Amino acid sequence: MSSPQVMWDIASHQRYAYSSIEHQVLPVWPKGKGLALYIAMNLEHFAFGLPEGAKLSQGANRLDVLNYAWRDYGNRVGGWYLADLFAELGIPPAVIANTAIIDYCPQLLDRWVSLPGSELVGHGHTNSQRQGELSREMSLR
């Protein structure tokens, strides 16, 4: 006795067709390099008193001083050490920054964009607000 064959209708995103790596043409990068790499530094400011931000765990978005402090440490200390390291190693970063950084710690943003070859990439106003949850009126401001 054979088992009946079950056909599953699996939903597809319909954005692109399946394509295996077997017959793909590899990109050719400048100077014949085989690998392209971009290094980015996120500069973000989170509002104190709001439970939003990176959802690193179930309890991560509860308001507490610990989560605010480790984020703020990057703007006060860690970001400066990393900028010095990038300068020492000659790594040109993509600086992904919230505009809230301009008001909170503009000196840190200035330090990063002063690195040779750096490029500034806009990253919204603040991660303390979920853009997908803003009203239409707020999103048009």
Image: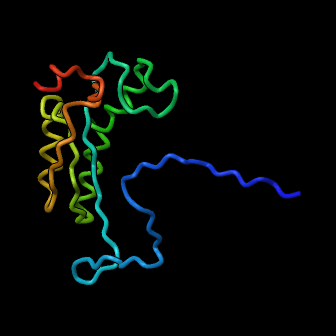
Residue 139 or residue 107, whichever sits in front: 139
Residue 1 or residue 129, whichever sits in front: 1
Residue 32, position as x, y percentages in the image: 27, 84
Residue 121, position as x, y percentages in the image: 18, 48
Residue 141, position as x, y percentages in the image: 10, 24
For the point 22% across and 65% down, which residue is it? 90
As drawn, the residue found furthest toward the bottom would be 32
Q: Is residue 51 left or right of residue 1?
A: left
> In what quadrant of the picture does the N terminus appear?
bottom right
Can you tell which quarter of the image residue 55 is in?
A: top left
Q: Is residue 139 above or below residue 11?
A: above
For the point 29% across and 39% down, which residue is it? 77
Q: Is residue 42 left or right of residue 63?
A: left
Q: Is residue 6 left or right of residue 72?
A: right
What colour scheme was applied to this rendering of the protein? rainbow
Residue 110, position as x, y percentages in the image: 12, 45
Can you tell which quarter of the image residue 138 is in?
A: top left
Residue 26 or residue 125, whichever sits in front: 26
Q: Is residue 14 above or below residue 25?
A: above
For the point 22% across and 20% down, which residue is it? 135
Q: How many marks?
A: 0
Q: Is residue 43 above or below residue 59?
A: below
Residue 106 or residue 77, whichever sits in front: 106
Q: Is residue 50 above or below residue 107?
A: above
Can you tell which quarter of the image residue 38 is in?
A: bottom left
Q: Is residue 69 left or right of residue 125?
A: right
